[in-house]
Image (spheres, rainbow, N blue to C red):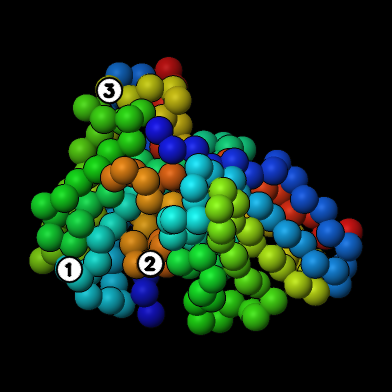
Amino acid sequence: SYELTQPLSVSVALGQTARITCGGNNIGSKNVHWYQQRPGQAPVLVIYRNTNRPSGIPERFSGSNSGNTATLTISRAQAGDEADYYCQVWASGTVVFGGGTKLTVL
Amino acid sequence: EVQLVESGGGLVQPGGSLRLSCAASGFTFSSYDMNWVRQAPGKGLEWVSYISSSGYTIYYADSVKGRFTISRDNAKKSLYLQMNSLRAEDTAVYYCARESQGIDYWGQGTLVTVSS
């Protein structure tokens, strides 16, 4: 079965740039979606199909996908960005989530 | 405004059954594929099942295959998850989620606790 690998945690200083990776075999050939989940809340889609932002998501959020790694980039990190982030793909008739990354804003 | 409201969660003994429902509003339910996604306490997201807009295409995670059944009633704008032979490891918040170039809308979830 297809697996997605994310770092358990990423830290970023306030106002700096955070990068969260999502590794998978030839993930560059797939559409990757990213979700933000704050404590006690349902997930929110922040990037769809690798690079696209839904309406209402700040331009500070961007995505890329190539080779074996997809990346979510959060520019000018704010305290409100502190959350868990999950990548997701479709693979062989199943939805696959990464294990999630806890972003800490210092 | 798109809304997905789950119901039917609760405490059930191992081996028991439960049926979750999800009431959809604010969009043309019959035009969208739907998912159930769960999250065990303190854990990550785990996909459970998918159903196409027509109901003809269905997929399950291996962990629930043969025990859970997804269905929908487009006339009632509702999604369902019949859960049988429940195990302790099925304890989680279950989310109803709309599929549209990613999962673009999620309900607030309903808690299922499997315990004796």
Circle 1: residue type = Ser
From the image, tell me which residue sits under label 2. Answer: B101
Judged by depth in the image, the label closer to the viewer, 2 or 3, is 2
Can residue A10 be seen here? yes
Q: Residue A58: x percent and y percent?
A: 64, 79
User: Is disc 2 surrounded by few (<14), some (14 to 19) or many (20+) residues within 10 Å?
Assistant: some
From the image, tell me which residue sits under label 3. Answer: B85
User: Is disc 3 surrounded by few (<14), some (14 to 19) or many (20+) residues within 10 Å?
Assistant: some
Chain for numbered disc 2: B
Please tell me in which quadrant of the rendered image residue A13 appears: bottom right
Please tell me in which quadrant of the rendered image residue A46 appears: bottom right
Q: Earlier in the sequence, mark 1 or mark 3?
A: 1
Can residue A84 be seen here? no
Q: Earlier in the sequence, mark 2 or mark 1?
A: 1
Judged by depth in the image, the label closer to the viewer, 1 or 3, is 1
Element under label 2? loop
Q: Residue B58: x percent and y percent?
A: 20, 46
Element under label 3? loop
Query: Is A79 on the left or on the right of A39, as rendered?
Result: right
Circle 3: residue type = Ser
Circle 2: residue type = Gln
Element under label 1? helix
